[in-house]
């Protein structure tokens, strides 16, 4: 290759790097959308709020990042841009992202037995970290919050029998299937990952690891991650971030694990997060399970879970309407916090309206 | 036995029902014993986080944690950032630990 050509290429690459927007202290804002499409989105996401019956859609925050710039945000009191909102099960995807950094450090392999890092799993020697990441431990877990309080494993884990040591509580469940064979959404599986991370990175680094590995590199200043009494992060439920800070994780994922010029997560890690679990079946849950992320992918010949969104859409989802959608093909990250106490909020509807409002269609 | 069922069909029926119920209670004894803790533990923990992690005001947090089961004896120690709640004959508390670790249910402090 001639010197001239390589210089020219270098110049083009540096141009491309400069053309890419990244947040520094704050997100750069660019003019927001307006018009009937935006009105339709706001009418859906922010109807008048009923705090007595708590019925209907109750959005706390809606924030949209396009091409690395903040193009829309709106909050409903008391939530503001500074509120570290409870993410509930979005925490699971955050823990997977923290795991990705450890993966990049070469500290574990996906097919490692979880037992290697969490010895209490001795009755389940074939259970791998990949199985836990797929919510496919085969442990007989009941994930139900309000409707089956007596039998709910997750309520017992968070509030009664399991709260002091959630991973130990999870291990005491019997197996119903062989590991890696069947998907069953389980907060217990996510907390087993959190407990395994303690030995993956070592007990000395563990208490600071989410901050040193993920939050600080992304410029996230104010994150809270509650632990159980054994010091294990409650990876299933209890991370708190502002909407703006959560969107930083979304941008990292939209750009295949790269933050600026640093490949924080290996590309094959993000590919694993976004690959459907091989035994996933259609309509088992809100979307198709990947590696602790939810995918808008077609399985078993069924339609995609969110037909009005591109098939590369993936998401982190939590109780009471918490959601972060990442759409790499549109360079979009959407954070939606809420306090929905019924099932009226629909991911597909929000995505459909947001895409209409923010993605200009190229005319043929 | 057959005589008993014929002479006292209703008693026999309720006896079977009672035995089934006792069996179920025995089988579910651990879950049943823990069950009454849910409401006070949930309320204490989520109020603590609402108030001291998310920094919402007290009035909002009370309404945020409200469930269909009643609670009583709500104590919010705003100096120690410790919340204690009673409900269904049980008491639980949650306390704020640190900026990063937020609140914890029944911490061993």
Image (cartoon, grey):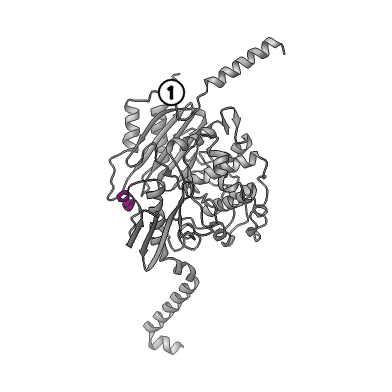
Residue A313: x, y in percent?
Answer: 50, 35
**Main secondary structure of the magenta stretch:** helix
**Magenta segment boundaries in residue numbering:** B57-63
Nearer to the camera, A311 or A321: A321
Q: Measured from the top left, where is residue A50 in percent x and y?
A: 28, 46
From this viewpoint, is residue A290 visible?
Answer: no
* Image-based side of A36 in relation to A22, left or right: left
Check residue B16 for magenta coloring: no
Instruction: Give the class, few, some or many, for how many residues have Cα within 10 Å of label 1's Cα (few <14, many ≥20).
Output: few
Q: Secondary structure at mark 1?
A: loop
Q: Residue furthest top?
A: A4
Residue A294 at x, y = what percent?
51, 42
According to the picture, the residue beneath numbered tag 1 turns out to be A361
Percent position of residue A6, x then y: 67, 14
Out of A229 and A278, give the one closest to the viewer: A229
Indicate the chain on which mark 1 is placed.
A
């Amino acid at each position: 290759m001639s010197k001239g050509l390589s210089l020219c290429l270098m110049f083009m690459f540096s141009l491309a790097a400069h053309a890419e927007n990244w947040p520094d202290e704050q997100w750069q804002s660019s003019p927001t959308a307006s018009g009937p499409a935006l009105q339709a989105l706001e009418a859906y996401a922010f109807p008048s709020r009923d705090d007595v019956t708590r019925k209907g859609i109750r959005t706390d925050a809606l924030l949209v990042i396009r091409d690395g710039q903040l193009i829309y945000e709106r909050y409903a009191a008391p939530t503001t841009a500074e509120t570290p909102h409870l993410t509930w099960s979005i925490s699971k995807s955050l823990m997977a992202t923290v795991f990705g950094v450890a993966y990049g450090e070469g500290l574990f392999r996906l097919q490692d037995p979880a037992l290697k890092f969490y010895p209490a799993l001795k009755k389940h020697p074939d259970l791998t970290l990949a199985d836990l990441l797929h919510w496919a431990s085969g442990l007989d877990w009941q994930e139900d919050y309000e409707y089956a309080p007596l039998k709910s494993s997750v309520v017992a884990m968070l509030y009664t029998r399991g709260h002091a040591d959630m991973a130990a509580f999870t291990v005491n469940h019997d197996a119903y299937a062989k590991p890696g064979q069947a998907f069953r959404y389980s907060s217990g599986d996510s907390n087993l990952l959190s407990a395994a991370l303690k030995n993956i990175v070592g007990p000395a680094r563990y208490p600071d690891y989410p901050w040193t590995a993920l939050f600080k590199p992304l410029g996230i200043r104010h994150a809270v991650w509650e632990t159980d009494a054994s010091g294990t992060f409650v990876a299933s439920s209890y991370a708190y971030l502002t909407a703006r800070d959560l969107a930083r994780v979304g941008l990292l994922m939209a750009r295949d694990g790269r933050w600026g010029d640093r490949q924080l997560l290996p590309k094959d890690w993000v590919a694993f997060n976004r690959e459907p679990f091989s035994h996933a079946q259609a309509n088992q849950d809100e979307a198709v399970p990947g590696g602790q992320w939810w995918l808008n992918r077609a399985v078993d010949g069924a339609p995609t879970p969110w037909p009005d969104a591109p098939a590369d859409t993936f998401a982190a989802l939590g109780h009471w309407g918490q959601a972060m959608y990442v759409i790499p093909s549109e360079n979009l990250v959407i954070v939606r916090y809420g306090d929905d106490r019924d099932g009226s909020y629909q991911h597909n509807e929000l995505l459909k309206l947001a895409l209409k409002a923010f993605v200009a269609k190229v005319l043929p | 036995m057959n005589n008993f069922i014929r002479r006292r069909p209703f008693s026999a029926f309720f006896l079977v029902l009672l035995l089934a119920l006792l069996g179920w209670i025995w089988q579910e004894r651990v879950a049943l014993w823990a069950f009454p803790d849910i409401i006070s533990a949930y309320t204490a923990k989520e109020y603590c986080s609402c108030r001291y992690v998310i920094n919402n005001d007290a009035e909002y947090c009370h309404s945020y944690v409200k469930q269909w089961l009643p609670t009583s004896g709500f104590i919010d120690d705003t100096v120690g950032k410790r919340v204690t709640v009673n409900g269904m004959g049980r008491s639980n508390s949650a306390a704020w630990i640190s900026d990063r670790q937020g609140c914890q249910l029944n911490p061993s402090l």
